Amino acid sequence: MTPAIDRRSLQHFDWVLLGLVTCVLGIGLANLYSASSPGVESGLPPEFRRQMLALGVATVGMLVALVLDYRRLERLAVPVYVGTLALVASTLLLAPLTRGNRSWLIYGPLSLQPAELAKVGLILAMARYFHRNPPAEIRRVRDLWAPALIAAGPVGLIILQRDMGVAVLTLLIAATYLLFVRIPARAWAALGAAGVVAFAGLWTYVFKDYQRERILDFLDPSRDPLASGYQQIQSRIAVGSGELFGKGYLAGTQTQLQFLPTQHSDFAFSVLAEEWGFLGSVLLLGFYFTLLIWGLVVANNSKDSFGAMLAIGVVGMLFWPAVINVAMVLGLAPVIGVPLPLVSYGGSQLLANMVAIGLLMNVSMRRYIF
Amino acid sequence: MSPHLAGNQLPIEGRLRLAAVLILLVLLVFVVRLFQLQILDGDKLRRRSEQNSVRQVRLEAPRGEVLDREGRVLASTRPAYRLEVTPNDLSDRGRVFAALGRLLGAEPAELDEKAGSSKGSRRFRPRVLADDLDFETLARVESHRFAMPGVRTHVEPRRHYLSGSLAAHTLGTIGEIRADQLERETFQDYRSGDVIGQTGLEAQFEAHLRGREGGRNVVVDVAGREVGDPLLEVPAVPGGRVVLSLDRDLQIVAEEGFAEVPEDGSPRMGAAVALDVKTGDVLAMVSRPAFDPNSFAGGIDTVTWKGLTSDEWDPLRNRAFQNHYPPGSTHKAIVAAALLQEGVIGPQTTAYCPGFFRFGGRIYRCWKRAGHGTVKLMDALRESCDVFFYTYGEKLGIDRLAIYSKAFGIGSTPGLGLGTEASGLVPSSSWKRRRFGEPWYPGETVSASIGQGFNLYTPMQLAIAYAALANGGKVMKPRLVLRLETRDGITVKTFPTEQTGEVPVTAARLALVRRGLRAVVEEPHGTGGRARVPGVEVAGKTGTAQVVRLDRVEGLKENEIPIRQRDHGWFGAFAPADDPEIAVAVFVEHGLHGSTAAAPIAQRILARYFEKKFGGPPVAETDGGSDDAGD
């Protein structure tokens, strides 16, 4: 048995990865301070304080995720997956209905969104499956039934929570692995057709009216122009008015006037773009996307396929919400309530993503251990 | 350990490269888009952010109207104007506040302080300097506004209760939604800061009255002024109307009755309820002391709120159905019906009243020390002889009496929907065992027969019971709302009349009791003479409920008794006596006597009712009957 941490793995600790994460987190926190300070009379803004607290918890989560050799984590993959599913399922019974969905477990001042943690369980389970059944050997659509089932667990439960945005996001994370299977093009076409038929069936026979409304609103924000149209206009003005150098920290007029309704969470990036301009925005995106590419490098250098698959899952987990969020802020996608990982306000998101980063570090620092 | 290839020979390397390319492509798209927005369109968007900004203005929906049964408006919505300043936009603070001080009649320095600093992150936040400007001030401010950038007026619909405190408890109050309410499923589409009905009808019909909020995207300049046409406007939809069964005229006279402070200066507290005996329609419902719901409409200030909640007489409470009190002799009407129906007495049965009743070694006194002599039921009701009811009530027994009290609606909540309701109390031997773990003592039946002891009524229950007595035994659910209408007057929902019970007493026996109550008002020596209405025969019963043991106030003159130790006065009535249409219950808290405090208020309500019906002249004073103080 390999000890939990040995000298060699410490020697190979991935300082580059830690540096990238620290840069993104630092920018995110500074930005959150600016975004949440309007309207605060004195002291630290409450959102900022809560996020600092969450960062402490999340850092502990990251350390836990990197201490234990990831090959031993493989054995824990199924229990973790089932455990996070149970947590999501418990929301259906325990969580109060807030703003139309049941996504939050609330205990006193603490609240947790188990769907975020379910993503970690999902990528562990997917990595374990594709470790045992290498994607390069999957050539038929029907061989995908098992991973489809693994993904259906969290996605189904999140749909029951009535949180459509998170459900789609979770599905996309699972779909990341499709890039690595060897299924011929016509099979993809067949799969797509089956999906369309299945969706049409759900639409007609299963969905309730309000669910259809939600999906339509999601696809076409102009159905509710007062809400989403306004946000897009404000976001575009905020981003564009930043110009090359930005208006300066704590000096973004759009931000400080609170033109953006959810500027500390979903529209955090517009605040950054307004106050730090093109240079600041490209810098953050540079750090973030280097982090994603670095994740792929970790996958490539991984000593075994479980590590590679785990690293791919982490990249997927960081990639999809970032793409959707930034595209929304830049007016390239409809307004969908998806936060930017590591940057937006939100403790559950931070915890889940830091645990994922811990897993990535875990794989990276044990790349030479045999 | 691994069953698969290790190291750099993973067969996924090609796909990882593809993934890296895809990720970089996405980054490229983002950078190009950022370049387009920030560099190419940057100047234009910078100018827009500095000079012209799109603001979203909420358009509050005016709350629906509340009307009385004849369509007269009780609650409506009016425009309210407030004056706001945005510190950031004030170019010359000294000059602006000097001007504003003159216009508003306020100290410039005070306004300056209220407006807050022109620096710091809050400088963009508009501050309210004056709320609910009168029209003249508004006009003056508006005509000078162009010289004062950063100053603007803002209009919003505000709840307006046209007659101030009239029917305040029924109409209820509005207020900002509380955090615990926001969590509830009912309020799913509400936001913090929204104003909702918190009590009374405002709360009960919140969904109907609320309407739907609209919004408008407008371009504003640096001074916060709207420039040009709105980019988008979704109009607010006003709320629907609620039509009540209340008759504003009766409500007014009923409240005026309580406004008359007796010469000894004691406060007039209590409640009055008038019901249509056939439909159960609530024609008037008063609770005193009251409050002005308008003070809640624009957000209640702390001083007023503290005053209302710490007031020792609890003006926010609706005494008509949220409190219950010992009914005193008004209870005798139900006892009489029970005695007749159970065969304990007939119309000719007599009792001898020497002024007291001896039972179980104790003396139970009649209110009239000299005694009433030999009395029949008719005399006992008219002059409220206690000994008659002691004698036969004890023979009837508490448990048989309880059946009748319950049948008349005492002990159960009528279900008005206006908030919590007191249930009243019908004592019985099983109740006492449950409540105190003690047996019922026969002596307690003696007291209970005249409405003392454990009996408790709400004024609403007394009205329901007397309406049932009047209409031949039907217990009607009080109906406060006739229908819901759209704001254009199209009916969307009606509320049918509802009978909730039947009194198990024959029509002939109820008629006997009614004759007795007619005598109370219409015959010489009756205790209810002050309720007489010319041209109409009135039936009723006075009641005086002891608040403290008799010996504690013995020997004191009435106006020397501390207010909280004074007896309560009751009067239950209906008219016309031979074919009743309206039943009235009046309760005057610490009013000393039913005959002097409560009966005149009932008289006013009845007089107004019949005056409206017959179109006769307003009725002023009536010559009182017996001046006997009580019962």
Image (cartoon, helix red, strand yellow):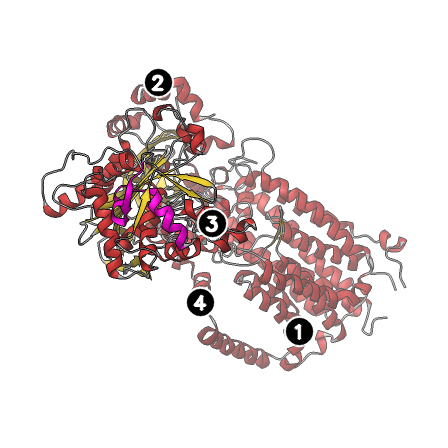
Please provide the residue range marked out in magenta.
B371-396
Counting residues from the start of the chain, the first of labels 2 and 3 encountered is: 2
Q: Quadrant of residue B88?
A: top left
Judging from the image, what secondary structure is the residue with disc 3 in? Answer: helix
Q: Which residue is mark 3?
A: B442
- Count up the numbered dots: 4
Q: Identify the chain of the residue marked 3, using the numbered disc in the image.
A: B
Q: CA distance from mark 2 to mark 4?
A: 58 Å
What residue did someone put label 4 on?
A: A212
Q: CA–CA distance between discs 2 and 1?
A: 73 Å
Q: Position of residue A166 (x, y in %)?
A: 57, 61
Q: Please name the predominant secondary structure of the magenta segment in the image.
A: helix
Disc ID at residue A147: 1
* Residue mark closest to the camera, 2 vs 3: 3
Q: The disc labelled 1 sits on which kind of residue?
A: Pro
Contact? badges 2 and 1 (CB < 8 Å)? no
* Residue lying at 21% horizontally and 45% vertically, measured from the top left: B519
In 3D space, how far apart are the residues under numbered discs 2 and 3 (Cα atoms)? 80 Å
Gap in angstroms between the C-alphas marked 4 and 3: 70 Å
**Which residue: 75% across, 71% down?**
A131
Which is nearer the N-term, disc 1 or disc 4?
A: 1
- What separation in Å lies between label 3 and label 1 (alpha carbons)? 81 Å
Secondary structure category for the residue under label 4:
helix
